[in-house]
Image: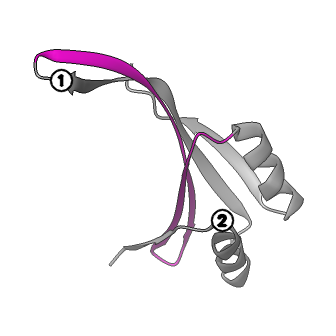
């Protein structure tokens, strides 16, 4: 049975990755315009930039979600901790 653990702080996420001996994560990036209702009958397009960082070990997905962060800076942070990063794109359009 698979389970998912979501972290809200990057430091605790990295600490858990190291404790579980996870040395590779995947970045699932979303960077696109999404419609949002501004008022009745009016939609505005708003930019959405989000990165999901995913690690996997023993049927458990370890996940950290961050919005409006520079992907390169985040990638460098993980690489500095000895964690390899694979980048994936999750744009709908």
Q: Residue furthest front?
A: 39
Badge 2: residue crowd in 10 Å (few <14, some 14–19, many ≥20): some
Q: Is residue 22 magenta?
A: no
Residue at image position (61%, 68%) is 9
Residue 10 numbered tag: 2
Residue at image position (67%, 45%) is 86
- What's the magenta region? 41-69
Q: Is residue 61 magenta?
A: yes
Measured Cα–Cα span from mark 1 to mark 2: 35 Å
Residue at image position (61%, 46%) is 27
Instruction: Name above or below for residue 15 compared with residue 27.
Output: below
Q: Residue furthest left?
A: 40
Residue at image position (31%, 17%) is 44
Q: Position of residue 70 (x, y in %)?
A: 70, 38
**In the rendered picture of this protein, how many numbered marks are placed on residues?**
2
**Quarter of the image that includes the N terminus:** bottom left
| 37 sits to left or right of 10 | left
| 18 sits to left or right of 57 | right
Residue 39 numbered tag: 1
| 92 sits to left or right of 87 | left
Instruction: Name above or below for residue 76 compared with residue 32.
Output: below
Q: Nearer the viewer, residue 85 or 64?
A: 64
Q: Nearer the viewer, residue 53 or 10?
A: 10
Q: Position of residue 80 (x, y in %)?
A: 88, 58
Label 1 element class: strand
Badge 1: residue crowd in 10 Å (few <14, some 14–19, many ≥20): few
């Amino acid at each position: 049975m698979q389970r998912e653990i979501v972290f809200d702080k990057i430091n605790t996420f990295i600490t858990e990755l190291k404790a579980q001996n996870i040395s590779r994560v995947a970045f699932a990036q979303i960077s696109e315009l999404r419609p949002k209702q501004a008022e009745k009958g009016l939609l505005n397009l708003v930019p959405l930039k989000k990165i999901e960082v995913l690690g996997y070990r023993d049927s458990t997905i370890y996940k950290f979600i961050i919005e409006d962060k520079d992907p390169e800076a985040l990638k460098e942070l993980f690489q500095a901790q000895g964690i390899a990063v694979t980048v994936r794109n999750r744009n709908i359009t």
